[in-house]
Amino acid sequence: MLQRRAFLLATAAALTVPAVSAWGRPLVKGRSTRARLTGARAPLDIVEDELGVPHVRANSLHDAYFGQGYLVARDRLFQIDIDHRRDMGRMAEAFGEAFVAADKAARLFHYRGDIDTELADLPPGVLECAEGYVAGVNARIAELEADPAQMPLEYGILGISPMRWDVRDLVRARGIGMGDADDEVRRAQMQAQGLLEADQLMAPLRPAWSYTVPEGLDCAAVSEADLGILLPSARPVPFDAIQEAALDPAERRTDRFAQGSNAWTIAPSRSTTGRPILANDPHLGIGGFSPRHMVHLTAPGLDVIGAGAPGLPGIMQGHTDRFAFGRTNFHIDQTDLFILRTAKEDPELYWHKGQWKRFETFEDEIKVKDAPPQRVVQRYAQGRPIVAQDPERQRASAFATVSMLPGGNMRFAIIAINLAKDWTSLRRAFRIHTSPTNFHYADIDGNTGWQTIGYTPIRPKHDGLFPAPGDGEYDWAGILPVEEMPHVHNPKEGWFASANQMNIPADYPYDKRIISFNWSDPFRYDRISEVLNAQPRHSIADSIALQHDVQSLPARSLIALIPAKLSPDAAKAAGLLRRWDCGIEADSAAALLYEMVMPQLLSDFRDAVVPEAAKAFIPSVNLYEMLSILAKPDKRLGADPVAARDALIDGALAEGWKKAQAQAGGDPAAWRWGDLHRVRITHPLASSVPAIAAAFPPIEGGRSGGDSYTPMARGFNAKRGYQVSHGASYLLVADVGAWDNSRFLLLPGQSADPRSPRYRDFYPRWLAGEMQPLWFSREAVERHAVARTLVTPG
């Protein structure tokens, strides 16, 4: 209560400052505060509009990004601080010995090369912006230290303090990621048992490809032990915020491929405005901290607005004054697990290119709360972290990941994109962009473009589907130039879209430039394509409607397969589904029934077609693969495939009917999918820290339509319930050139502090799909301004 009272008093006092700009000019509208902040190089204005979007007006690139860093820390300090602490391997010093294993793993993925060279090699202006962002974060921390009443509530509850930031840490921390190493291990294990072809039921290769085991790999010797610290279970921690450790491998894979994004770009020739339209809705986790934060940055040579990832400098999805840009995940196989042979007499030696080489080692000291510090030794081979060692078997695993390469760091690429002026300069910026991305582009001159970006390893002698011997024969031979990645500029069709589907052009030389074999199912893309192809002209309203489209193509496929003769319960289910338009609406009874039937069908299909010996490796089957087989049943279903198919569907319908009654009651007229499929947002530590739960009441009550496979993706994991777990918490539709017509949504709001009016103000708008204006022009911003912060250097 005292903290809340102090916060409100400070706010009320601040609002009495006269409304003049940092240069003494009267302001058109809005109440103002003053802030003297260390790290700013010159005065700057921060104007907040009535929707909570801040507009930073600075005299330099440094100060524009200073404003972003300051604002992100103002609204999301604990979120970015805990992520930064985890990346830097400094959790144990705040939370104790249970985090030592996690800290050791995080530090294993710290860049050990020349940081000064990394910084010097950045494109012009990028380092200045990054330094400004870091200075802004630190300025907010200093401000809170001087006025602890405004400190985010978590710090008092947990008894910790925020960490200061250093721009060099943006180079150092590279992050732990499994990549597809677990898939490589699984394939090797299945190959050893003669079961590999069954893996296509869970992870079909796209495009079609023949398995080739790297020469020298002993598949029978491969096990999960080779993954070492890549396995979340190898670095257990008590906080529920690190949820991946609680998931089994099948759930981790399901979650990885379910979380995608949508984007489409419409050329002037296909739009009702005569201007390009660009729409983007990134599908990320829903239920904890919001993964996006809004800001508008203006300075000489810079004018960009949109959403950034908290803790990452720059705008990821939005527009400049010249072009709009969006992104979806593009699947690139960016990792490999290399199996090394170590020397029997000295396990610090490994065999590589015809000679014994010694692991490169670094010593780290991990500070531990209420305990002595612990010293750890980190090992590397050719710059690759050693994730597992077994001296008795003369064996070690090196994890090759593009993120550990020189320049392989995403923390600067977004700035370079923000500073670009056109398609040509953007493609130069893409050279430092590591993460796999479909990049969408549309400019005020009417040009549109799609470019796949991200570091793609060149593998001269293998395809990345299995672990490879680490003797040097299978080493990477560099990174594929961005110019050789799939792309298109001003396509003749007048539109293009991406939804994480396999979108490699048919004439792309895949045998020479292997990118990936694992892609999301194409259901969302196929529905988007269906809609766009049916519209001779596409409008802003059409894009908004498509972002909220809940038409289910898997449901259509299922209903088309329902047999004529059915058991009594199955017939009841079939009757309801056949009268349905296949829209996963929140108020739909049939949608609820469908969501009971489909998981049952997937489970029954797995039981029927996966060989018994392979079931340990295939805990679930791929939905697209299952529906394809059911549409054209073959001998995998038995001697009479059609009868077996019909029996499977009958059984799933009957069981789904029973589950629907158990979940929603005996009266189908009262069933509503949204009653189960709710949107609940809680603090990630609420379930493990009671005081956090008390201080951060959940944001809840909202009902939702959609599922993982509808364009309005509202995914869930049936094993863990029906609550929405991922989807588009940020949505953008850009009217290119008429920027004030652009629309956006952000769930649940800008702030993660329950004392702020921006804590949940967008929650009802997001649930209703009520897209809001993204004001950009100075005139529009001034017209809708409600508050200002006038910053002067401290």
Image: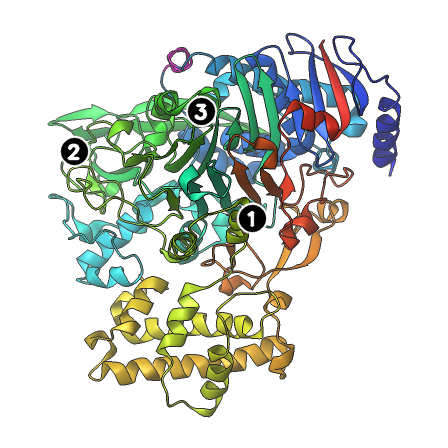
Q: Earlier in the sequence, mark 3 or mark 2?
A: 3
Q: In the rendered image, which quarter contains the C terminus?
A: top right
Label 3 – label 2 distance at C-alpha: 38 Å
Which is more foreground, mark 3 or mark 1?
1
The label number, if any, that marks residue 541 in the structure image: 1
Which region of the structure is painted magenta?
Answer: 114-121
Magenta stretch holds residue 583: no
Amino acid type at circle 3 is Ile
Q: Earlier in the sequence, mark 2 or mark 1?
A: 2
Query: Measured from the top left, where is residue 319 in percent x and y?
Result: 52, 30
Amino acid type at circle 2 is Asp
Residue under label 2: 471
Query: Measured from the top left, where is residue 62 in percent x and y?
Result: 57, 13
- Vertical relation: 706 (above or below) 301: below
Residue 193 lies left or right of residue 588; in this view the side is left
What is the crowding at mark 3: few (fewer than 14 residues within 10 Å), some, or many (at least 20)?
many
Viewer-proximal residue, 70 or 147? 70
Tags 2 and 1 in contact by the CB under 8 Å rule?
no
